[in-house]
Image (cartoon, grey):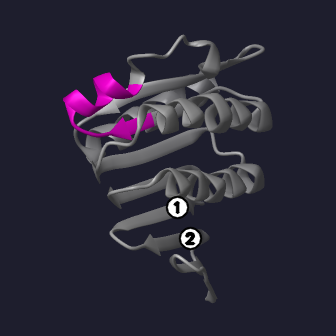
């Protein structure tokens, strides 16, 4: 295990024998876990608590590091325990993180987001859709209330994508 400290909290990166790469950070009242699950080729992001604008940017910087290293086409974003973030921060995620991830991966990306219904509507309310397209590649986002159904959908998308 490799440990490093940050001024606002703590961070750690763990490598496991089964191929799991896990990077976790703690900032005050929030907890962020970013993992690349080698066995399922899935990027998993679990975020809890309140999040400032700076923490949003730092957290998604960690996400992008794993995206660049592994180019995952399946993402599981579990945000059901994270408090709502500011509209400007959400816009930044879509315009900077998601569009850059599509450029980096150069394939369709399937994103399963776990969060309450009211949160999902506020999340996608102002999207134009352009943020989720890069040449012939798309970021396909689907909302779920539970992790099991999100994982099933990602598996189905992977199987469907392999047949194309």
* Residue drawn at point x = 21 percent, y = 28 percent: 118
- Stretch of the chain drawn in magenta: 112-123
Q: Are marks 2 and 1 in contact (CB under 8 Å)?
A: yes
Dot 1 crowding, Cα within 10 Å, few <14, some 14–19, many 20+: many
Identify which residue, 164 or 106, lies in the foreground: 106
The reply, left or right, for residue 157 in relation to residue 29 is right
* Residue drawn at point x = 71 percent, y = 57 percent: 65
Looking at the rendering, in which quadrant would you find the C terminus? top right
* Residue drawn at point x = 23 percent, y = 43 percent: 146
Dot 2 crowding, Cα within 10 Å, few <14, some 14–19, many 20+: many
Residue 2 percent across, percent down from the top left: 65, 87
| Pointer 1 residue | 34
Of pointers 2 and 1, the one earlier in the residue sequence: 2
* Residue drawn at point x = 46 percent, y = 65 percent: 33
Disc marking residue 47:
none
Numbered disc 1: secondary structure: strand
Residue 74 percent across, percent down from the top left: 55, 40
Numbered disc 2: secondary structure: strand
Residue 60 percent across, percent down from the top left: 59, 51
Q: CA distance from mark 2 to mark 1?
A: 5 Å
The reply, left or right, for residue 132 in relation to residue 45 is right
Residue 61 percent across, percent down from the top left: 65, 55
| Pointer 2 residue | 23
Would you identify the image quadrant in which residue 98 lies?
A: top right
- Is residue 130 something one can see in this rendering? yes
- Is residue 15 something one can see in this rendering? no
């Amino acid at each position: 295990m490799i440990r490093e400290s940050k001024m606002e909290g703590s961070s750690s990166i763990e490598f496991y024998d089964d191929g799991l790469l896990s990077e976790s950070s703690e900032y005050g009242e929030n907890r962020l876990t970013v993992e690349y699950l080698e066995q399922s080729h899935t990027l998993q992001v679990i975020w809890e608590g309140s999040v400032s604008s700076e923490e949003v940017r730092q957290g998604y910087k960690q996400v992008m590091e794993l995206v660049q290293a592994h180019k995952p086409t399946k993402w599981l974003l579990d945000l059901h325990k994270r408090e709502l973030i500011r509209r400007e921060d959400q816009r930044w995620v879509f315009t900077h993180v998601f569009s850059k991830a599509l450029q980096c991966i150069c394939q369709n990306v399937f994103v399963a987001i776990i969060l309450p219904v009211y949160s999902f509507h506020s999340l996608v309310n102002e999207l134009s859709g352009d943020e989720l397209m890069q040449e012939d590649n798309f970021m396909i986002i689907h909302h779920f209330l539970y992790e099991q159904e999100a994982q099933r959908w990602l598996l189905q998308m992977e199987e469907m994508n392999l047949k194309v």
